[in-house]
Every structure is written in structure tokens, then in C-alpha cells.
Image (tube, rainbow, N blue to C red):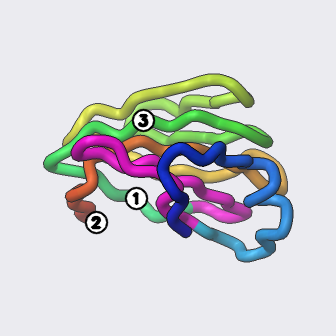
Amino acid sequence: MKTTPLTPIDINEITRSITDRYANFTVAELNDHVVRLSVMTESYHWHYHPNSDETFMTVEGILLIDLETETIELLPGQLFTIPKNIVHRTRPKGERSVNITIEHSQLETVNP
């Protein structure tokens, strides 16, 4: 899904009807970055990004970010940045989480 510039984006309205186990799509572009919206009811696989940091912000539910040494728990309204080259995976705590991700538009993903 792509939005038109100068148009408000209603995250709650967009995500209300999503029933997929995992949905991830661009909602805005800025400079050389994208803002993605994800709705997840299951874990995403372990991976890392060699060319970009990745910032997550939870909108609904609780997002768990597993790192090799710890797990970060993000509540709604909290933000966390993963530096490039750090192996991680994301998963909801509970039934569902809705998250905003900001990352480079040419993001590379590597599965270790």
C-alpha cells in the first residue's frame, strides 16, 4: 500500500481489517528511507541487515525483538533501533502486534 503525499495516514484504519498472519508494506517514503507498517501474529525469521539500521515502534500489542543476547519488549508508543549487522528477529507477545518500521529503501536482508 502506498499513500499520497500530504495525506494523513490512519494506522488504526489500515490495520483494522488485516487478518494475515504477517503483513508488511510501505506506507510512506522519505528521502532514502521508507516507513513500513507490519501486522504480525507469528514470528519473523532470524536475520540481519548489512547496509542499514532498522527502527521499530509499536502501535498495538507488544513487540518482542530477540537479539542474540537478550529480548527487548516494546510496548505501544516505544521505539527501538537495531544497528546494522545485528542478528535479530521480531515476534508478537500475545496474539498480535502492529508496528511501524523505518529503514533504508534499499535495505538488504541476510538470513544467517
- Quadrant (top left/top right/bottom left/bottom right) for the C terminus: bottom left
Is disc 1 placed on a helix, strand or loop?
loop
The percent coordinates of residue 82 (x first, y second) are: 36, 33
- Magenta span: chief secondary structure: strand
- Which numbered marker is on residue 111? 2
Establish if 100 lies above or below 73: below
| Front-lying residue, 10 or 108 | 10
Measure the C-alpha gap from mark 2 to mark 3.
19 Å
Q: Quadrant of residue 21?
A: bottom right
Instruction: Tell which residue pokes out farthest to the top in this image.
Output: 78
Residue placed at 27% from the left, 32% from the top? 83
Residue 46 — which label?
1
**Numbered badge on residue 55:** 3
Please tell me how crowded label 3 is: few (under 14), some (14-19), or many (20+) other residues with Cα within 10 Å. some
**Extreme front residue here?**
6
Q: Residue 102 lies in what quarter of the image?
A: top left
Task: Give residue 54's position: percent from left, percent from top.
Answer: 36, 40
Tell me the quadrant of the picture where the N terminus can be found.
bottom right
Q: Is residue 64 above or below residue 25?
A: above
Report if the CB atoms under discs 3 and 1 are less than 8 Å apart.
Answer: no
Q: Earlier in the sequence, mark 3 or mark 1?
A: 1
What stretch of residues is rendered in magenta?
24-43
Secondary structure of the residue carrying tag 3 is strand
Residue at 16 percent across and 49 percent down: it is 50
Left or right: 35 with respect to 84? right
